[in-house]
Amino acid sequence: MHPALPTIRTTCPYCGVGCGVLATPNASGGLNIAGDPQHPANLGRLCVKGSALGETLDRRGRLLTPRIHGRPARWNEALDLVAKRFSDTIAEHGPDSVAFYVSGQLLTEDYYVANKLMKGFIGSANIDTNSRLCMASSVAGHRRAFGSDTVPGLYEDLEQADLIVLTGSNLAWCHPVLYQRIAAAKEARPEMRVVVIDPRRTATCDIADLHLALAPGSDAVLFNALLAEIAARNAVDENFILNLNGLEEAVQAASQVQTAATGLSGDDIRRFLDLWIGTERVVTVYSQGINQSESGSDKVNAILNCHLATGRIGRAGMGPFSVTGQPNAMGGREVGGLANMLACHLDIENPVHRNAVQDFWQAPKMPEKPGLKAVDMFRAVEDGRIKALWIICTNPVVSMPEADRVARAIANCDFVVVSDMMAQTDTTRLAHVLLPATGWAEKDGTVTNSERRISRQRRTLPSVGQARDDWRILADVAARMGWSERFAWTTPAEIFAEHAALSGVAGNLGSDFDISDHAGITAEAYDRLEPFLWPQSARKRGGRFFAEGRFHHPDGKARMIAVTPRAPQPTSAEHSYRLNTGRVRDHWHTMTRTGISPRLSRHLAEPFLEIHPRDAETLGLTAAGLARVSNPHGASILRVLVTDRVAMGQPFAPIHWTGETAPSGRIDVLVPAVTDPVSGQPASKSATVAIAPF
Ligand code: SF4
């Protein structure tokens, strides 16, 4: 009999809920998985993806050695080549001729090192992330309103609220444990109300008292109508508005809206306005349905405006709440891993901030302007401005808009490095150099969930093959480029301590992000680190920002933004269907892990197209038959699922499936590279397409 192996507390690597996981090594070399009852995010719960983690640790398909042009190589040879090609490219064409495209799946320590190398030492801001596809509009909305990228809400607010509005969020499938928490709270307090605002009747509607199936893209119209009604009924908070700028302009813009654009009945709109205005404790949860739009930032600000005007922010059971898709999108924001941000929520275009970070890093140079955001970055790869690209922990050939075009751009780039745990992805196939990375269960670090709670992810299994941690790979390349002293960490604990010390510098400059209590953390303390909310000072006050009505703009006031709603790109006679995209319950991103589990694939086994019965009839589609969905960007073949959960003209397809040859189930081949002008986030919820039987 094997002796019992110790259980290790770690964190789920999937969504932004950030559930605590108990991982117990078992006799067959795998892990038994359970929810961590002590973790504040989930209190022992797990969703089906999290509970299946032990089934996705198979080493089949793993990238086991570095590869150069497809042949196995030694680490030193691969690292030397990466460092030389990046150094040579920078020397010949300047720092903006190289780029990193990284991931909200990275641990914070990995992310910190990538950002430090690109911004402080290479001297370019050309580092962007797949989080650009996920929540960049929320970041932009927060910064415009609050002067900082601050998420004010806490998960406990979801249980303390009397009204929860879920807009552009299929929480039941995309953040299941938060959905479970709300469902349990509603069961305990049946008087709690839930409103779901979504063109589709999703699983989240199962707990809704009111489902508003609004017209795609009309969210800002609805929230403008709410703001106008708040003003008309004198429901503004007269004390709180002393902390605001822009109220009058925002209300004036809101008063111009025509609610007919929402496609909702007057009665439904009235019920929503009455509920929202008449309920003090209201939380508005929003996610990709808001963010992934060509006017995502405005939609975010239309929501924030309503909470600011009523002072419903920073107090128990109320506030706007952006929930992030990825497990560490928030950690990436904290380290400044977006092309338009500096570390610790500082501002890349502020010389005082830049100098402070440069001094702290003892860095040779810092960029003075933002770098290329994801869509623009791949455009620059396409037209040759980017000549060396390092893709880390992400699969843009599947997930970027106009994915076929992105594939062609990468294929034609002079030098492409891909770090990944898997050998064969749509992106790894295009790499000149492949670097094997450790995966979940094999690495130590931290992640930050949607409520700003930092948790440890702990190594529970040995690494596979020659895989190395991403932070170490980056630091080894930095050393070869001549910066060994500044990248000389030996453990992720040392990186965390440096990041925490930098946050103290940032805090002194007014940044909201401050974890400087941990600046001197020891390896032992890092190992024991319990999940905690930042900032430390707010944690002592209960963790809520803005309770005192002070914001991070220089005058201490929040800004309301005058929002003029914009309709999405119009359909045409040829491409007359507006395709909505999103996640399914049991798969994650491009399925490199969840696709391994037969149990997870049983829920929905293949890519599909949800389409309204009358559209199916018009098009001659039969249930369970195949449809070809196409537009000038690409084509996809999908199984037909006839359902009235979607409205006529508004089919839906999931994002996860991949495929080596076109047409396949890849959906982002159809998504146009149209972006929000403020955030640079693509409008992934809205592709105009033609549909035909296949
Ligand atoms: Fe993991 Fe998210 Fe499920 Fe929690 S809700 S177990 S973080 S996928």
Image: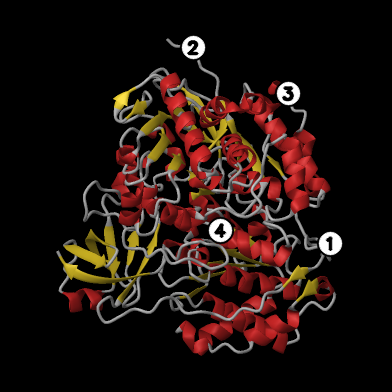
Residue 171 pos. (x, y %): 50, 58
Q: Which residue is mark 4?
A: 136
Mark identifier at residue 522: 3
Q: Residues within 10 Å of mark 3 (few under 14, many from 20)?
A: few
Q: Residues within 10 Å of mark 1 (few under 14, many from 20)?
A: few
Within the image, what quadrant is residue 688 found in?
bottom left
Gap in angstroms between the C-alphas marked 2 and 3: 30 Å
Q: Earlier in the sequence, mark 2 or mark 1?
A: 2
Viewer-closest of 506 and 49: 506
Of residues 49 and 128, which is closer to you in this image? 128
Q: Is residue 325 left or right of residue 656?
A: right
| Residue 250 found in image quarter | bottom right
Assess whether mark 1 and mark 3 are in contact (beta carbons under 8 angstroms): no
Q: Which mark is residue 3?
A: 2
Residue where numbered disc 1 is placed? 548
* Separation (CA) of disc 2 from disc 1: 54 Å
Q: Is mark 3 within 8 Å of ligand 1?
A: no
